[in-house]
Amino acid sequence: MNLLEMHNLLNFIWGETFRLNEELREEFKPLGFRVEPVEEVFNAYIYLDGEWREMLYPHPAFELKPGGEVGATLQGFYFVFGIPREKITEEFVEEFIQKFKKSYIYGSENFLEDFYNYHRPKEPKEVFEEIKESKEELINFEVGELTVKELRKYLFDFIELIKKYGLFDV
């Protein structure tokens, strides 16, 4: 392990998260979202070598209210939004999977069991049926392993998608 490379990576993800937080605070205000300050997130998981692994170390993230989080891990930048199960449609699931190639869909309670994981893709109809039959109240839609530029583009694309399907009152 190269300590200088690790140091530089950690400085990069924290520095870029702080920068994104400042920029998005102004850009998202007119869209009806509130951007909270950057925090240290503990008790998270990262998908490595085919399984979810606990991160005992913190990573930077901030809430994008209502319902979202933006942050960075060693893999790259991500955003995730929790959507009430009863609002989710098959069309939304299909469009989400088509638009966002590096994505995950999972429940907020049993978050280690994916409904969708781009490493093991499934048909959107099957994903929707599993969501509909689950006991989860809140379903997380995550797009990750992104560059800062990709994050910005995909985040705005996602906001348009949730507006299209009326998933948040913004």
Image (cartoon, rainbow, N blue to C red):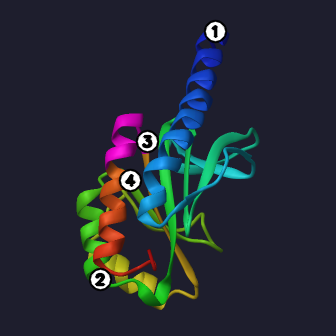
The residue that mark 3 highlights is 145
Tell me the element at label 2. helix
Q: Which residue is mark 4?
A: 155
User: Disc 2 designates what residue?
Assistant: 90
Residue 167 located left or right of residue 100: right
Above or below 72: residue 100: below
Gap between marks 4 and 3, in whole Å? Answer: 13 Å
Q: Nearer the viewer, mark 4 or mark 1?
A: 4
**Percent from the top left, x then y, of residue 128?**
36, 81
Answer whether residue 24 is magenta in the image: no
- Location of residue 73 in the rendering, given as x and y in whole percent from the top left corner: 57, 39
* Front-lying residue, 124 or 22: 22
- CA gap between label 3 and label 1 equals 22 Å
The amino acid marked with disc number 1 is Leu
- On screen, residue 161 versus residue 134, left or right, reads left
Residue pointed to by mark 1? 4
